[in-house]
Amino acid sequence: MAIDEYLHMFNIPVIIIRLLMATVCGGIIGFCRSVKKRGAGFKTHILVCLGAALIMMTGQYIFEEVSGGTGDVARLAAQVVSGVGFLGAGTIMVTGRNQVKGLTTAAGLWACSGIGLAIGIGFYSGGLIATLIVFLVYNYMQKIDEIAYEHSRVYDLYVEFESRKYITPFMSAMKERGFKFLSLELSKSKKNKEEIVSATMSVEVSSKSKGVDVLQFIEALEGVNSVEEM
């Protein structure tokens, strides 16, 4: 009997192989996140991948052993795809300056569950190739993101003002310079009994403007206490 045929059988040794393979694949992906100190790291990804593989095998067991081949082998697996979304949502957070963080980790958990399902049903090549691709995305695609950011004309900014009266002149000066507001949100808070007026915004600049020039221009405007790119 060929190894390929044996690995697609459903017995104790094959079950062990599938669970161990899911553990290794989940661990590889999780290690990438642990290195970057993300909330969902090594252990979380292992458990997601392992659990997905087990659920897929449970569906296969029900299909072959319980229902006599008349059930739906993918019914339990479908619940994994949607259910892991709740776990992923727990890794996503919006900071006080409206920055969204954790999307990549959430997507990785979702992909990890898919890898577990593939391995659980015996689609080893798909699971292993997907693990390799996710690993490459986590470790090398960041450079492509950085190149895209360097050529982007959109800046996400956080600006603090001395008082609210400077906001209108600020917006007028920005528009005169050719900056286009894509979004703008104002907020007020108190620090040491002093009122702080701030704004988070996305602006589109001309192709000739550079990030440093944009920040220097805004810092020089009347009434601006500080500005930083998010």
Image: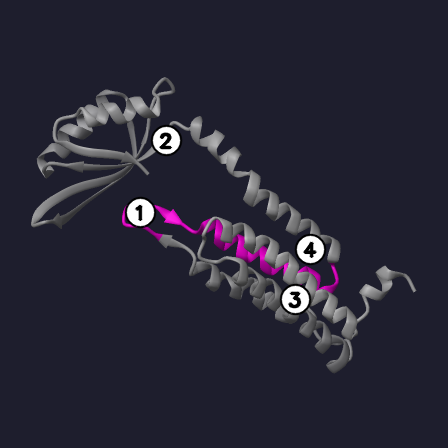
Q: Is residue 104 left or right of residue 17?
A: left
Which mark sits nearer the N-terminus, 3 or 2?
Answer: 3
Structural distance between the alpha carbons of marks 1 and 4: 36 Å
Q: Quadrant of residue 149?
A: top left
State if disc 2 and disc 4 touch (CB < 8 Å): no
Which mark sits nearer the N-terminus, 1 or 4?
Answer: 1
State if disc 4 and disc 3 touch (CB < 8 Å): no
Q: Could you tell me which residue is drawn at 11 percent across and 32 percent down? A: 166
How far across and how far down the image is residue 177, in percent? 25, 20
State if disc 4 and disc 1 touch (CB < 8 Å): no
Q: Amino acid at mark 2?
A: Val
How far across and how far down the image is residue 214, in percent? 29, 25
Structural distance between the alpha carbons of marks 1 and 3: 36 Å
Identify residue for label 4: 127
Vertical position of residue 173 compared to residue 145: above or below: above
Quadrant location of the N terminus?
A: bottom right
Identify residue for label 3: 53
Identify residue for label 1: 98
Mark 4 vs mark 2: in front: 4
Query: Residue lying furthest right in this view?
Result: 1
Q: Main secondary structure of the magenta part?
A: helix
User: Is residue 117 inside the magenta stretch?
Assistant: yes
User: Is residue 158 inside the magenta stretch?
Assistant: no
Vertical position of residue 203 compared to residue 185: above or below: above
Quadrant location of the C terminus?
A: top left
- Kindly state the secondary structure of the residue where label 1 is placed: loop
Q: Amino acid at mark 1?
A: Asn
- Highlighted magenta segment, given as a residue range: 94-123
